[in-house]
Image: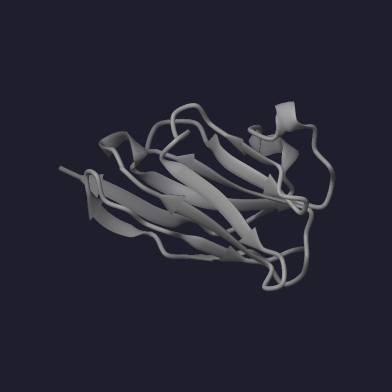
Amino acid sequence: QVQLVESGGGSVQVGGSLRPSCTAPRSIFLMGWFRQAPGKEREGVATIDYDGDTTYADSVKGRFTISRDNAKNTLYLQMNSLKLEDTATYYCAADQASVPLNRRSEPAAFNFWGQGTQVTVSS
Protein backbone atom coordinates (compact mmCIF):
# COMPACT_ATOMS: atom_id res chain seq x y z
CA GLN A 1 0.00 0.00 0.00
CA VAL A 2 1.20 3.51 -0.84
CA GLN A 3 -0.11 6.39 1.24
CA LEU A 4 -0.29 9.64 -0.67
CA VAL A 5 -0.53 12.89 1.27
CA GLU A 6 -1.91 15.97 -0.46
CA SER A 7 -1.75 19.61 0.57
CA GLY A 8 -2.12 23.03 -0.97
CA GLY A 9 -5.76 23.26 -1.94
CA GLY A 10 -7.79 26.29 -0.99
CA SER A 11 -10.14 29.03 -2.11
CA VAL A 12 -9.32 31.60 -4.77
CA GLN A 13 -11.13 33.98 -7.05
CA VAL A 14 -11.54 33.48 -10.76
CA GLY A 15 -8.23 34.04 -12.50
CA GLY A 16 -6.21 33.13 -9.42
CA SER A 17 -3.62 30.41 -8.91
CA LEU A 18 -3.02 27.47 -6.61
CA ARG A 19 -0.30 24.84 -6.36
CA PRO A 20 -1.33 21.68 -4.57
CA SER A 21 1.28 19.03 -3.87
CA CYS A 22 1.31 15.32 -3.11
CA THR A 23 4.02 13.35 -1.35
CA ALA A 24 4.56 9.62 -1.64
CA PRO A 25 6.57 7.51 0.82
CA ARG A 26 8.81 6.18 -1.95
CA SER A 27 9.56 6.54 -5.63
CA ILE A 28 6.65 5.49 -7.80
CA PHE A 29 6.52 5.42 -11.59
CA LEU A 30 3.28 7.13 -12.50
CA MET A 31 1.54 9.94 -10.63
CA GLY A 32 -1.37 12.13 -11.50
CA TRP A 33 -4.17 14.42 -10.46
CA PHE A 34 -7.86 13.70 -10.78
CA ARG A 35 -10.80 15.81 -9.68
CA GLN A 36 -14.39 15.26 -8.75
CA ALA A 37 -17.09 17.90 -8.49
CA PRO A 38 -20.35 17.26 -6.60
CA GLY A 39 -22.67 15.07 -8.65
CA LYS A 40 -20.04 14.37 -11.28
CA GLU A 41 -17.71 11.49 -12.04
CA ARG A 42 -14.06 11.61 -11.16
CA GLU A 43 -12.06 12.85 -14.13
CA GLY A 44 -8.42 12.90 -15.06
CA VAL A 45 -6.66 16.27 -14.93
CA ALA A 46 -3.00 15.55 -15.60
CA THR A 47 -0.44 12.80 -15.20
CA ILE A 48 3.33 12.53 -15.26
CA ASP A 49 5.60 9.52 -15.17
CA TYR A 50 9.09 9.14 -13.75
CA ASP A 51 10.60 9.95 -17.15
CA GLY A 52 8.64 13.19 -17.40
CA ASP A 53 6.03 12.20 -19.97
CA THR A 54 2.84 14.14 -19.31
CA THR A 55 -0.83 14.03 -20.24
CA TYR A 56 -3.43 16.75 -19.74
CA ALA A 57 -7.18 17.00 -19.99
CA ASP A 58 -8.20 19.37 -22.79
CA SER A 59 -10.02 21.56 -20.27
CA VAL A 60 -6.80 22.43 -18.43
CA LYS A 61 -4.23 22.59 -21.23
CA GLY A 62 -2.38 25.88 -21.21
CA ARG A 63 -3.51 26.70 -17.67
CA PHE A 64 -2.28 23.81 -15.51
CA THR A 65 1.24 22.39 -15.33
CA ILE A 66 2.05 19.08 -13.67
CA SER A 67 5.55 18.43 -12.39
CA ARG A 68 7.36 16.17 -9.97
CA ASP A 69 10.49 16.19 -7.87
CA ASN A 70 11.73 12.61 -7.99
CA ALA A 71 14.30 13.21 -5.25
CA LYS A 72 11.50 14.24 -2.87
CA ASN A 73 8.85 11.82 -4.20
CA THR A 74 6.59 14.84 -4.57
CA LEU A 75 4.06 15.75 -7.22
CA TYR A 76 2.84 19.27 -7.98
CA LEU A 77 0.03 20.84 -9.96
CA GLN A 78 0.47 24.50 -10.83
CA MET A 79 -3.01 25.81 -11.57
CA ASN A 80 -3.25 29.24 -13.19
CA SER A 81 -6.17 31.21 -14.63
CA LEU A 82 -8.58 29.24 -12.51
CA LYS A 83 -12.20 29.12 -13.59
CA LEU A 84 -15.42 28.48 -11.69
CA GLU A 85 -15.64 25.06 -13.31
CA ASP A 86 -12.31 24.04 -11.78
CA THR A 87 -14.01 23.84 -8.39
CA ALA A 88 -13.71 20.24 -7.18
CA THR A 89 -11.96 17.90 -4.80
CA TYR A 90 -8.57 17.15 -6.30
CA TYR A 91 -7.10 13.72 -5.74
CA CYS A 92 -3.53 12.58 -6.13
CA ALA A 93 -3.17 9.14 -7.71
CA ALA A 94 -0.25 6.85 -8.33
CA ASP A 95 0.64 3.49 -9.79
CA GLN A 96 3.82 1.54 -10.24
CA ALA A 97 2.77 0.12 -13.60
CA SER A 98 3.57 1.69 -16.94
CA VAL A 99 0.01 2.55 -17.93
CA PRO A 100 -0.40 3.30 -21.65
CA LEU A 101 -0.68 7.01 -22.37
CA ASN A 102 -4.19 6.67 -23.75
CA ARG A 103 -5.40 5.14 -20.47
CA ARG A 104 -3.84 7.57 -18.02
CA SER A 105 -7.02 9.64 -17.72
CA GLU A 106 -8.90 6.63 -16.35
CA PRO A 107 -9.25 6.44 -12.56
CA ALA A 108 -9.37 2.64 -12.78
CA ALA A 109 -5.78 2.61 -14.06
CA PHE A 110 -4.46 3.84 -10.70
CA ASN A 111 -4.21 1.73 -7.56
CA PHE A 112 -3.17 4.32 -4.97
CA TRP A 113 -5.07 7.44 -3.98
CA GLY A 114 -4.75 10.37 -1.64
CA GLN A 115 -7.51 11.65 0.58
CA GLY A 116 -8.28 14.65 -1.62
CA THR A 117 -7.84 18.40 -1.26
CA GLN A 118 -10.60 20.91 -1.92
CA VAL A 119 -10.17 23.61 -4.55
CA THR A 120 -12.88 26.27 -4.63
CA VAL A 121 -12.95 29.02 -7.24
CA SER A 122 -15.36 31.90 -6.69
CA SER A 123 -16.36 34.98 -8.66
Mark count: 0
Q: Is residue 37 left or right of residue 100?
A: left
Q: Give residue 87's position: percent from left, percent from top.
A: 33, 43
Q: In the figure, 106 relative to 74: above or below? A: above
Q: Is residue 121 left or right of residue 51?
A: left
Q: In the figure, 22 relative to 40: above or below? A: below
Pick the front one: 50 or 44: 50
- Which residue is painted at 57% across and 41% down in the image? 46
- Residue, far right: 97
- Which residue is painted at 72% across and 26% down in the image? 102
- Which residue is painted at 39% across and 32% down in the image? 39
Identify the image quadrant of residue 70. bottom right
Pick the front one: 113 or 69: 69
Q: Give residue 95's position: percent from left, percent from top.
A: 76, 50
Q: Quadrant of the C terminus?
A: top left
Q: Give residue 61's position: percent from left, percent from top.
A: 47, 33
Colour setup of the view: one colour
Pick the front one: 65 or 47: 65
- Which residue is painted at 42% across and 59% down in the image? 19
Q: In the figure, 95 relative to 24: above or below? A: above
Q: Quadrant of the N terminus?
A: bottom right
Q: Give residue 84's position: percent from left, percent from top.
A: 26, 37
Identify the image quadrant of residue 109. top right
Q: Is residue 48 left or right of residue 18?
A: right
Q: In the figure, 63 relative to 114: above or below? A: above
